Image (cartoon, coloured by chain):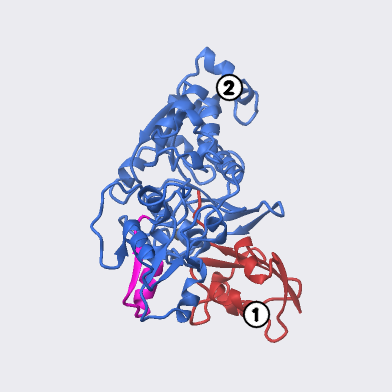
Chain colours: A blue, B red
Amino acid sequence: MGSATLAGIDATQHTPQANAPELNSDEILRYARHLLLPDVGLDGQRRLKGSRVLLIGAGGLGSPTSLYLAAAGVGTIGLVDFDVVDASNLQRQIVHGTSTLGHRKVDSARDRLRDLNPHVHVETYDAPFRATNAEEIARDYDVIVDGTDNFGTRYLTNDVSVLLGKPNVYGSIFRFEGQASVFATADGPCYRCLFPVPPPPGMVPSCAEGGVLGVLPGLIGTIQATETIKLLLGLGTSLAGRLLLVNTLDMQFRTVKVQKDPACPACGTRTITHLEEYEEYCGIPGTEPHVTIEAPLHPDEITPVELAEKLKRHDDFDLIDVREPQELAIASIPGARLIPLGSFQAAIPSLNPEREIVVMCRSGARSGQAVAALERAGFKRARNLVGGILRWSDDVDPTVVKY
Amino acid sequence: MPITVNLPTILSKLADGARVVEADASAAPTVGAVVDHLVDRYPGLGPRLRDDGGQPYPFVTFYLNDDDIRFNGGFAAAVQDGDEVTIVPAIAGG
Ligand SMILES: [Zn+2]
């Protein structure tokens, strides 16, 4: 514990052992199994109590991470999330519950963490993490945990971590596979060293196709919690400089090297000196921001009511559904031709640019990308079904299941 | 010269479901040749593995054994019999 810089984090800077808060008798009982651990002990537990960890996202990854960090006695836990607890979250987001459906996620999580450990202080930020507020929110924390669900916020989380010199404990999941690492330590690489540029919307599967094994964020999130505690205590060897790849189908764990890129604009040349926004967001169910304001319709948009009228009139047009086959099995609009977004670009030559085309998906996000691709290809009569199946269910046919 | 290629599940569906594929690099002992061989066999993988100029994307990282090929010549990185190539796409779910 005497070393000033362990595993790339100056643990003493943020939680000076001399000033580390004392534990009361309740806490000594609660943390007994830590106090008995030779590498944690009373000093380590006091250091955890004096630590501040910021979790970006209180969803799949943030759930197990926040629960274990609270249970472990990390003194202050910050939670950033702008979403509301939805029934479809509970298959994996175990910090929330049936009793908090409809509540703000940060409130739902705070209540659960307080119940788990009343000695922990939870600070909530019920807002999207953006270039305009990221630095201010993150400034007073020791470690940042990336539990976000889109590339834009991942790059932002990385850049703010590098700028502020705080370790970024990274986890990411897709279907049956996960990744974890520690970025932005003193000498270690960052997320941009691994993936220099975010993929264009629709190019990478996570944007085009949803679905995740519910227990997978449990695996990756607990790895993030472990790495966070190791960083705070200066224990062991962190994942800095390595990327852990988890494949649950074959149950294989492997690590590969992440090299610090001298040309990295964030941590290498340091040409990124201020934060910028990535507006892109994915078409994964549940990741679209909740839009409550009725936006004016663009010429290349159509409402579900208008579409229903067109179908009733038997207008001559093509209706294209860019969702995945498994989504079709849940809910559909009759007469639509399925072309999943991932194969949409390749299918464009099979479409007639002279015909009127309406493109639809779950929420209107993916179909918006498809319409943009059609417009780039010279189609003049392509329109996006605004609000997708969700709004179709609201405005036209409530028997269509929302998911 | 057999090289083992580990595909992420999302790409394996474009390779008839295979998550591990053996590729031959006798034409040229490079990662690029391994990718060529793979794409010959599974053409659907092509646009997911390389851009219009035939180069790797910045959001799909290729590992030769444990090392990122970006720091070892990119697709020109030399492979040997028994090497493993692991393809790691950027994913963003949380
Ligand atoms: Zn970097």
Dot 1 corresponds to which residue?
B30
- Left or right side of A94 for A266: left
Amino acid under disc 2:
Tyr
Amino acid under disc 1:
Thr
Q: Residue at x 35, y 76 (%)?
A: A376
The local secondary structure at tag 2 comes to loop
Q: Determine whether A198 is above or below A9 in the image.
A: below
Whether residue A99 is visible to the viewer of this picture, yes or no, is yes
| Residue found farthest to the top | A25
Q: Determine whether A254 is above or below A378 in the image.
A: above
Q: Residues within 10 Å of mark 2 (few under 14, many from 20)?
A: some
**Magenta residue check for A382:** yes
**Magenta residue check for B43:** no
Dot 2 corresponds to which residue?
A31
Tell me where the magenta segment starts and ends, as one range: A370-387
| Residue found farthest to the left | A296
Give the chain of mark 2.
A
Give the chain of mark 1.
B
